[in-house]
Image (tube, rainbow, N blue to C red):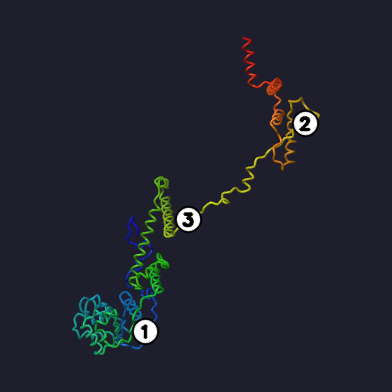
Amino acid sequence: MIKGDFILEWDRALGFKSDPFADKIFTPINQFLVDRIEEKEKLNWFFIKGYFYGTILGEQGVGKTMLLRWLEDRLKKYNRIHAVYINAAVFKEQVNIPQQMLLPLLSVYEKIISKPHTKTLTVEPISLIKKKLGSKSLALLIDNAQHLTEKNLELLKQLRNDGLRFQIIVTSTPNEYKKSRLAELGQDDLDITLRRLNFAEAREMIAKRVQVFGGVGIAPLNDETLQVLYDRADKNPREFLHLCRDEAIRILIHKKSLFDRQSMQPVQLQQAQPTTAKGVKGAKLQSRKSALAAARRSDEEFDIGLRKATPEGISESPLEQEKKKFFRIRFDISEKKSGNQNQPGQPTTANASLRTSSALRELNARSDDKQPVLNDRQRQELVDQLSSTSPRRKKEQEDRDKRKKEGLSETDRILRELADEFEKR
């Protein structure tokens, strides 16, 4: 579980019921064992033929115990054979092999109250074992058999000489097997040497574990990550499981850190959050979704491409250029007499409108000519003709006409007015 800034139950945080990468033998074992077709066929033939002694050799972590446990599970489905699994590595002293063979055959009353296996001498348990077995045969599966003492080996030879119907399969590493006396037990009629898993088998092993423990596919790992871990483990299944476990935890911690960064908000935004229980729950859910979405993109790389602007890219379109064109209006100032003509210098509004319309018609007719057609004098006359006919404007116009006739400028007129006013005083 994730509590605060510390992760303890990482498997639950990833959605697993338990640790799927643990170095353990899970049951039902058939759901976890990667298909070793050739090895399974050899084991099947060994019991069909009734061979006495066989070996399963391989380096540490390659899957010897897993295969031996699978064999025990298969044999227990048949009533005519009694399978006993012994791990010699867990006994610091000599293994009491007869007791290990007898205990599974005892009833609950015998195990707790009468305890016949503790009251007999060394020879008597063999006869008790034969009695309990009846018509059954015995399959003795010894894991890490290199730890068996010389006394254990002599006892196994004696059991065979005493007529006990049993078969022995042992596991060991190749080097330890050569150093031991296990070969004295008999001819090796099994002769299995476990190879390392290929990548497809290693991936299948991870997928089976993840799915049994409630996961999907090989998540949170992917094929690329598995390939890297598989190469780093040098194809050893046990080491591969350890690396997958560490990588899954690393991914969880990495995404949690990213989630914490994404979920941090300014104080103003936090104060704006709803205060009701339902609103707070919805806000937290939305924040979690955003953080998880950001975590999925945490390993992606973003490439921002920059390009230099070209003259074509920054040039204005023809439509924009067309909008910036200026229109030049030409006015018709030709002296045409009309039936309702006023005095010169006093045009009416109707006459001005007619002249303007005439100028617009001339503009439309000569749109191809863009040169100005009016000089300064003509423009002034046109303005004078379009001026208002109000009394004030009419008086100003008369004054301007008078000054033009006298040939006085505005400055001269002001000076004259000042002189006249001074003389009156």
Element class at badge 3: loop
**What is the crowding at mark 2: few (fewer than 14 residues within 10 Å), some, or many (at least 20)?**
few
Residue 352 locus on image (x, y percent): 73, 31
Q: Which residue is mark 1?
A: 42
Q: Amino acid at mark 3?
A: Ile
Alpha-carbon distance for marks 3 and 2? Answer: 71 Å
State which quarter of the image contains the C terminus: top right
1 or 2: tag closer to the N-terminus: 1
Nearer mark to the viewer, of 3 and 1: 3
Alpha-carbon distance for marks 1 and 2? Answer: 125 Å
User: Which residue is pictured at 24% across the width and 90% down the height?
Assistant: 161
Q: Is residue 314 visible?
A: yes
Q: Amino acid at mark 2?
A: Glu
Q: Which residue is mark 2?
A: 335
**Residues under numbered marks 1 and 2 in contact, where contact means CB atoms less than 8 Å apart:** no
Residue 39 locus on image (x, y percent): 37, 81
Q: Which residue is mark 3?
A: 304
Alpha-carbon distance for marks 3 and 1? Answer: 60 Å
Residue 43 lies in what quarter of the image? bottom left
234 versus 359 height, above or below = below
Residue 338 lies in what quarter of the image? top right
Q: Is residue 84 visible?
A: no
Nearer mark to the viewer, of 1 and 2: 2
86 versus 425 height, above or below = below
34 versus 293 height, above or below = below
Nearer mark to the viewer, of 3 and 2: 2
**What is the crowding at mark 1: few (fewer than 14 residues within 10 Å), some, or many (at least 20)?**
some
Q: Amino acid at mark 1?
A: Lys
Residues 397 and 300: in front is 397
Q: How many marks?
A: 3
**What is the crowding at mark 3: few (fewer than 14 residues within 10 Å), some, or many (at least 20)?**
few
